Image (cartoon, rainbow, N blue to C red):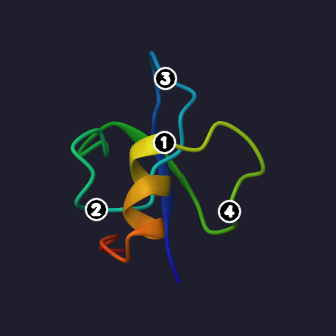
Amino acid sequence: MAEYRRRKTGSDTWHWCRNCHLDPKSDYDTRDKRPDYDLCNHCKAKEKNNDCRT
């Protein structure tokens, strides 16, 4: 199961691909359920291309 993360300050975008260059590495909020909004376009593209590491 993927973990969704976003920076605590300065961003509302949720990331789930650990190989996304924008995925926060520290100071982030998490959730287990996929959000319905503010999903990272880079993570979406990686997921579509089967290149998303969770």
Cβ atoms under marks 1 and 4 closer than 8 Å = no
User: Relative to residue 48, is residue 22 depicted above or below?
Assistant: above
The numbered disc on residue 11 is 3
Q: CA distance from mark 2 to mark 4?
A: 15 Å
User: Relative to residue 45, is residue 7 depicted above or below?
Assistant: above
Q: Nearer the viewer, residue 40 or 35?
A: 40
Q: Residue at x 71, y 53 (%)?
A: 35
Q: CA distance from mark 3 to mark 1?
A: 13 Å
Q: Which residue is mark 2?
A: 18
Q: Amino acid at mark 1?
A: Asn
- Going from N to C along the chain, the mark reached first, 4 or 3, is 3
User: Label 2: how many residues lie within 10 Å, few (<14), some (14-19) or many (20+)?
Assistant: some
Judge from the rendering whether residue 36 lies leftward or rightward of residue 25; answer left or right: right
- Going from N to C along the chain, the mark reached first, 2 or 4, is 2
Q: Secondary structure at mark 1?
A: helix
- Going from N to C along the chain, the mark reached first, 3 or 1, is 3
